[in-house]
Amino acid sequence: MSLRSSNYDTVFLLNFPYQIIVGKDAWQRSGIPQPVIVSFCVAHDLERAGSLDDMEATIDYDKLYHEITAVLTSPGKVFRDIQDLSATITGCYPAVDTTDINDPLGNVGYTLSIKLPKGVLRAEGGLKYTQTMNTEEGQAGHGLSQSLSIENIKCDCIVGANQYERSIKQPVVMDIEVMCRRYFPDNPSTSMVVKVLNCYHEMVSSVCEKVDASSFRTLEALATSIAREIIENFGVEVVTVGVEKPSAIANVQAAGVRITRSRSWFASMRLPTGIATSAGEDKA
């Protein structure tokens, strides 16, 4: 759930950049600053502020921004990983400094987005982590949810049914997204997002290596094999995979597919294991 796209009143700070140390960089080096882009949206009843033009009845987004900036850029500050960074940011505003769904200050919740635009080699869109707290009982998404997406992963492979596509590799662009709709901070192992945060460098490298050596007639089969690789080898239960062919049609930016697959789906389908090699054989 994104609060900015919902029916709630919201106050938000959009796309404010930093250069800070968050986990390992794209080369898996520790202690190296990297670009980080933050967006923070807080759900808050703005009826009084809108009716009376009253600053005291709303959230001071200027003060919130400066509080976040002061903490994130303090000398010697190092964030262990994205979750450490997200906890620090939400802690800058008392109304969202809680993992208790019964928010004592009465706000509906928040959405925090953290993007590492250069955080993953071969992923030109970088890595994006989103955390949403919805404290309104009875609503879809009630509680704490997470999502992690790795965008615009570039590979070259044989894919297509046309004769000219069978002899020359062409570029494909992939997106990978993992979601956890109910996250329990006291038990991080319950979150697929946490699992991927611990291995996303290895996951992307593995997917790219196998896609580069693959051969498929359809994007659907390629996307399915990517999903299977992630689920079988990286402890994920459900994953969404998007695959595009920018060169498929001359006057179209890209043609593509987007699928969501689960571990139970693969178990029921009993598909061959591995991503097909360029020779058309299965590679375990």
Image: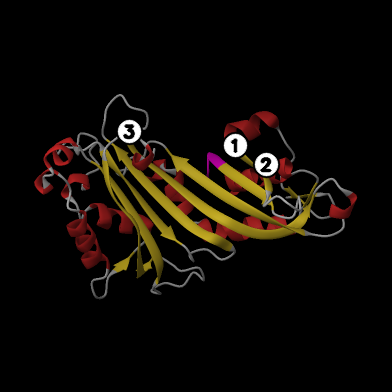
Residue receiving disc 2: 224
The range drawn in magenta is: 235-239
Numbered circle sitting on residue 7: 3
Query: On screen, 11 above or below 265?
Result: below
Q: Which mark sits nearer the N-terminus, 2 or 1?
A: 2
Label drawn at residue 261: 1
Query: Where is residue 30 shown, x and y percent of the image?
Result: 42, 72
Residue at the image position 72 percent from the left and 36 percent from the top: 271
Q: Residue at x 67, y 52 (%)?
A: 253
Q: Nearer the viewer, residue 180 or 57?
A: 57
Within 10 Å of disc 1 (Cα), the crowding (few <14, some 14-19, many 20+) is some
Residue 238 on the magenta segment: yes
In contact (CB < 8 Å): disc 2 and disc 1 = yes
Q: Are marks 1 and 3 in contact (CB under 8 Å)?
A: no
- The residues bearing labels 3 and 2 have C-alpha atoms spaced at a distance of 35 Å
Q: Is 21 in the magenta?
A: no
Instruction: Estimate the x, y position of residue 100 in percent, counting from the top left.
Output: 22, 38
**1 vs 3, front mark:** 3
**Picture disc at residue 58:** none
Q: Mark 3 is on which residue type?
A: Asn
Amino acid at circle 1: Arg
Cα separation, mark 1 vs mark 3, equals 30 Å
